Amino acid sequence: MTDFTKQYSGYRFVSTRRGDTLQMVAFRELGNANDWAKLAWFNNLLPPFITDDASLAGDRVLLSGQELKIPSTVAESESSSNDLENVLLTDCRLRNGRLSVDETTGDFEVVSGRDNLKQAISFRIVTDPGELIYHPGYGCKIGRRKGNKNAAVATLMGRMDIQDALIQESRLRRIDSITTTSSGDVLSAVVVVTPITGDPVQADVSV
């Protein structure tokens, strides 16, 4: 039985974004850009599949911003209950930058869904670009604004730095607000974002 004929037992909806291609959505949601054909079949789409041009959109071509069905091989009820964990992912929990241990299982503690996204946002902001040698583009330049005697300039540039960093986060639908404050050598930020599924998330960060 091929990918095009097997019966999926569940699905979830995601909103497409301006500039999206089906390959980009497949990579973002399924982890493999080559699964674009699976999405085309599952949603009964024809080329160009997704478009920013309203004149090209139709019954079988989505206008960016419209929702796309993402197939799942788990039961629909299970897919719904685990949607946030599946979409916003699971990672190791870091406390003060260190791995923590689950006292019950003795294994590394993990964090999922909205809490994982909040952790990811915080660590992206406090990490200086180049600090992770295998990911030189990861991080935020806000730390370089510390000590700037002009607090107004530091907070303005810091807000722009955070925005530039968060644009790289594929799990975000939009950045709702970024509020930065400066006190001595400490820059603080309150970031509110809307993930690709679920309600807005707030992360408080100090550098």
Image: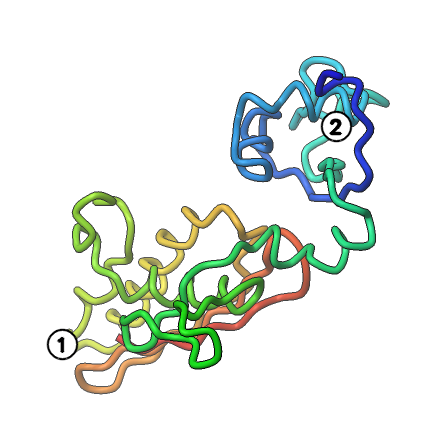
Location of mark 1 (residue): 147
Q: Position of residue 48 (x, y in %)?
A: 67, 16
| Left or right of residue 3, residue 134 in this image | left
For label 2, the SS is: strand
87 or 50: which is nearer to us? 87
Residue type at mark 1 is: Gly
Q: Residues within 10 Å of mark 2 (few under 14, many from 20)?
A: many
| Left or right of residue 9, residue 39 in this image | left
Q: Position of residue 104 (x, y in %)?
A: 48, 79
Location of mark 2 (residue): 62
For marks 1 and 2, the one nearer the N-term is 2
Vertical comparison of 33 with 83: above or below: above
Vertical comparison of 13 with 32: above or below: below
Q: Quadrant of residue 112?
A: bottom right
Q: Position of residue 125 (x, y in %)?
A: 33, 63
Colour logic: rainbow
Residue type at mark 2 is: Leu
Residue occupying image coordinates x 35% and y 58%: 160
Q: Residues within 10 Å of mark 1 (few under 14, many from 20)?
A: some
Vertical comparison of 192 with 26: above or below: below
For label 1, the SS is: loop
> Furthest-top residue in view?
47
Vertical comparison of 192 with 59: above or below: below
Q: CA distance from mark 1 to mark 2?
A: 48 Å
> Furthest-front residue in view?
105
| Left or right of residue 149, residue 138 in this image | right
Q: Nearer the viewer, mark 1 or mark 2?
A: 2
Q: Position of residue 43 (x, y in %)?
A: 79, 27
> Furthest-right residue in view?
59
